[in-house]
Each structure stands twice: as C-alpha cells, then as structure tokens.
Image (cartoon, grey):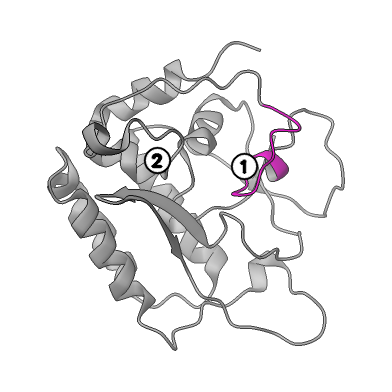
C-alpha cells in the first residue's frame, strides 16, 4: 500500500501503517501544498490548532516532495515546540517522551521528507510498532489496492472515498471536557495521552479486510 509522508500525521495514518502488509512511501510525487506533508493538527485549550512547517518556494516546475526544502526564515521550530509543550505538558505521557521529540525542534533538517521520515520512525518506536518500508520508484496515478491513502489522508478530504475499515476507538483527551472528543488529530495527541496503550487504540481502530 502506498502512503504519503506526513508531519506527525493523524491517527488514521498510523492505524493504517500498523495494519499494512507492505508499506511503500510515496517518493516520486509532485509537492502539493496544504497537505499533511508539512502540517499536523493538535488540540489546545481553545480547540484544534494546526502547525505548519514553512517550505522554500521554488519558481518554475513544482518540485518532487523529496526535494522540498524547509524554510527557516521564521522561528517555526520554536513556535511548534512551545505549542506542543503548552498543549500537552499536563498530559499523562508528555514528560516521558519529550526528550525524544525536542531535538526535532532544535536541529535543522534541510529536506522536509527527511524530517518527516525520521519523526515517523520515532513515533513508531515510541508506540512499539513495526515500520518497514520501501520507496516508490515512479508515480502511479491510480493504485490497485483501494483505498488510495494519498487522497484520503488529507486535511481537505471530502469523504468521497471513505476508508470503510477505519473506525477510531475514542480515548481520553486532555481538554475533552471543554472541546468534546476530537477525532483523528495528530498521532502525538494519542501518544501523549495514552502512551504505550496507543498501540491498542490503533490496533482496535481498524477492521478486518
């Protein structure tokens, strides 16, 4: 199954990763703006909060995702880390994992793809889930194995091609009394609230094909 690369992608993404027999990371697509490649959504005291990584704009042909460079003309790393600390410092497992995540907000990565991939590897280690992958060698406009996660795991997904196997198991969120349960946030919302039990939530959120 072909997966897009994501920045701390949503719970749906990791549930699919856990259950995939084979994982191919999309390595040959043209970069598309306003996707989970450079955006994640967490929840803070006032509700959902998107965090977006700025990228270097290139003139001419749209670059491949793997060639997109991260922009550092704004202090986005500091802002993102402060947002994560503010949102999750009172959650049950934030302090347990914070030392693993903080270096991603101090070290400068050149390419967005590398940053996303190493964060994904870290998340999978924290959840104790396998993450074995290959890269695509060319772009496929259509895939034989439905659903096409490149279109479904998207901030602007309209529900036209639903993932019938995904049914998120609710878990306790830090601001749930105020916001209600907010489904399919960034994986860190699940991880910082449930810790090692995140694996069970992901396992139980996918039905059998």
Check if residue 10 falls in the magenta segment.
no
Seen in the picture, residue 181 relative to 59 is either above or below; the reply is above
**Labels 2 and 1 touching (C-beta < 8 A):** no
Badge 2: few (under 14), some or many (20 or more) residues near its Cα, within 10 Å?
some
Determine the residue positioned at 75% across, 31% down.
161
Which of the pair 72/184 is nearer the observer?
A: 184
Residue most extreme to the right? 141
The x, y position of residue 171, in whole percent, is 31, 25
Residue 19 image-quadrant placement: top right
Percent of width and height locating residue 197: 27, 25
**Is residue 195 visible from the viewing direction of this image?**
no
Q: Name the residue beneath numbered marker 1.
A: 153
x, y percentage for residue 136? 74, 50
Above or below 119: residue 147: above
Total marks placed: 2
Q: CA distance from mark 2 to mark 1?
A: 18 Å
Within the image, what quadrant is residue 32 found in?
Answer: bottom right
What is the span of residues highlighted in magenta in the rendered image?
151-162
Q: In the depicted view, which residue is nearer to us: 209 or 38?
A: 38
Q: Which element type, helix, strand or loop, lies under badge 2?
A: helix
The first of marks 2 and 1 along the sequence is 2
Q: Is residue 183 left or right of residue 86?
A: right
Task: Write the residue at 61% across / 56% down.
Answer: 35
| Residue that badge 2 annotates | 124
Looking at the rendered structure, the secondary structure element under dot 1 is: loop
Q: What kind of secondary structure does the magenta stretch mostly adopt?
A: loop
Q: Position of residue 53 (x, y in %)?
A: 48, 69
Tell whether position 153 is magenta.
yes
């Amino acid at each position: 199954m072909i997966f897009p690369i994501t920045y701390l992608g949503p719970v749906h993404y990791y549930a699919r990763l856990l259950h995939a027999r084979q994982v191919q990371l999309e390595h040959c697509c043209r970069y598309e703006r306003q996707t989970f490649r450079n955006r994640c959504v967490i929840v803070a005291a006032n509700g959902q909060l998107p965090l977006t990584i700025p990228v270097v704009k290139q003139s001419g042909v749209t670059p491949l995702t793997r060639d997109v460079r991260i922009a550092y003309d704004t202090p986005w790393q500091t802002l993102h880390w402060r947002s994560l600390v503010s949102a999750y410092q009172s959650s049950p497992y934030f302090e347990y994992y914070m030392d693993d995540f903080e270096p991603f907000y101090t070290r400068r990565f050149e390419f967005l793809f590398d940053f996303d991939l190493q964060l994904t590897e870290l998340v999978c280690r924290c959840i104790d889930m396998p993450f074995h992958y290959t890269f695509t060698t060319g772009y496929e406009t259509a895939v034989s194995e439905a659903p096409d996660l490149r279109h479904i795991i998207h901030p602007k997904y309209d529900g036209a091609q639903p993932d019938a196997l995904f049914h998120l198991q609710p878990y306790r969120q830090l601001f749930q009394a105020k916001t209600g349960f907010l489904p399919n946030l960034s994986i860190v919302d699940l991880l910082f609230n449930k810790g090692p039990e995140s694996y069970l939530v992901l396992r139980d959120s996918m039905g059998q094909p």
